[in-house]
Image: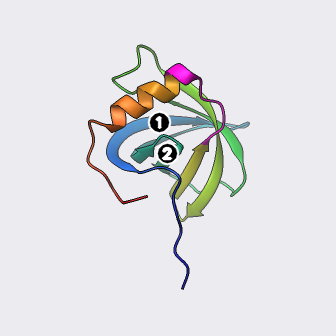
Amino acid sequence: MTTEKRRSRRYLTNLPVLLSLRERDLEGYCNNIAEGGLGVFLPEPIALGSVVSVRFVVPTHPTELHVQVGVRHQFGFQHGLEFLSLSEAERLAIRQFCTQLPSVSTV
């Protein structure tokens, strides 16, 4: 039996997200967030390994975040997205937002 070690603690949230694919945009929601990425529920599966843009708002950042993410996990409509292009200010805003949320799991 193997256990997966996460790089970042995940936190429960419910944020609307918009993923921009080449051919269309998909609306979904983020059900957990971490300094390293998002857990997102989408209306259709996105291929593992895809790189897409995601837009979302956290209350600790003055503007909408618009970042590149990689699809690292996909199970049905649930996706694990890893941040690929966060600025230091965006990373800090996410870190501050996470401190206000209940934890999902241990690292």
Q: Nearer the viewer, residue 95 or 40?
A: 95
First along the sequence among labels 1 and 2? 1
Q: Which residue is mark 2?
A: 38
Q: Does 90 sit above or below residue 78?
A: above
Q: Position of residue 21 (x, y in %)?
A: 68, 38
Does 10 sit left or right of 99 as displayed?
right
Magenta span contains residue 65: no
Where the N terminus falls, by quadrant?
bottom right
Q: Which residues are magenta?
A: 83-89
- In the displayed structure, would residue 67 be above or below residue 64? below
Badge 1 is on which residue?
Answer: 17
**Label tally:** 2
CB under 8 Å between discs 1 and 2: yes
Looking at the rendering, which quadrant does residue 60 occupy? top left
Question: Mark 2, residues whose alpha carbon is within 10 Å: few (<14), some, or many (≥20)?
Answer: many
Where in the figure is residue 48, as x and y percent of width and height? Answer: 69, 58
**What colouring method underlies this structural image?**
rainbow
